[in-house]
Amino acid sequence: MKHILLFTFIVIITSCNQWSDKDTLEFMEQCEKTKWEKEFCNCAIEKVKLQYNSFSEIAKNENHISEILIECIDENKTH
């Protein structure tokens, strides 16, 4: 019984700290509304997913998101 409870707890905790399909879709929709190119949005979401656990967490870190977007703009210019 202890193993089942531990396993359930671990699954719940780890699933709470992952990007859902809904989070990804919401981010991409917001990015594409800005009329940025798809490659730029793909760059941004990959960088954001590495640093934030969910779409809602981004709102708490708007200043850092600006830095990520600038990185993607710079990378897009060099390609």
Image: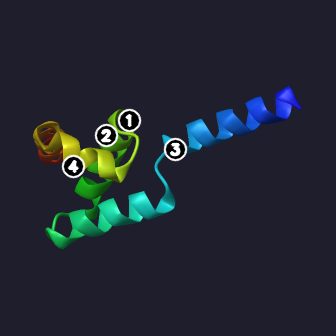
Q: Which residue is mark 2?
A: 47
Q: CA distance from mark 4 to mark 1?
A: 16 Å
Mark 1 highlights which residue? 50
What separation in Å lies between label 2 and label 4 (alpha carbons)?
Answer: 15 Å
Label 2 crowd (10 A; few <14 / some 14-19 / many >=20): some
> Can you tell which mark lies on residue 59?
4
Q: Is residue 76 left or right of residue 29?
A: left
- Secondary structure of the residue carrying numbered label 3: helix
Measure the alpha-carbon separation of dots 4 and 3: 17 Å
Looking at the picture, how far across and down is residue 46, in whole percent? 36, 44
Q: Is residue 15 left or right of 40 when viewed as pictured? A: right
- Labels 4 and 1 touching (C-beta < 8 A): no
Residue position marked by numbered label 3 in the rendering: 16
How far apart marks 2 and 3 lie (CA) works out to 19 Å
Q: Secondary structure at mark 4?
A: helix
How many callouts does the rendering have? Answer: 4
Instruction: Please state if 50 lies on the left or on the right of 8 as rendered.
Output: left
Q: Quadrant of the C terminus?
A: top left
Q: Quadrant of residue 30?
A: bottom left
The three-letter code of the residue at mark 2 reads: Lys
Residue at point 28%, 63% (across, down): 38
Q: Are marks 4 and 3 in contact (CB under 8 Å)?
A: no
Q: Earlier in the sequence, mark 2 or mark 4?
A: 2
> Which percent across, then down, holds residue 17?
48, 40
The mark lying in front, picked from 2 and 4, is: 4
Lower position in the chain sequence, tag 4 or tag 1: 1
In which quadrant of the rendered view does residue 6 lie? top right
Judging from the image, the colouring scheme is rainbow
Question: What is the three-letter code of the residue carrying label 1?
Answer: Leu
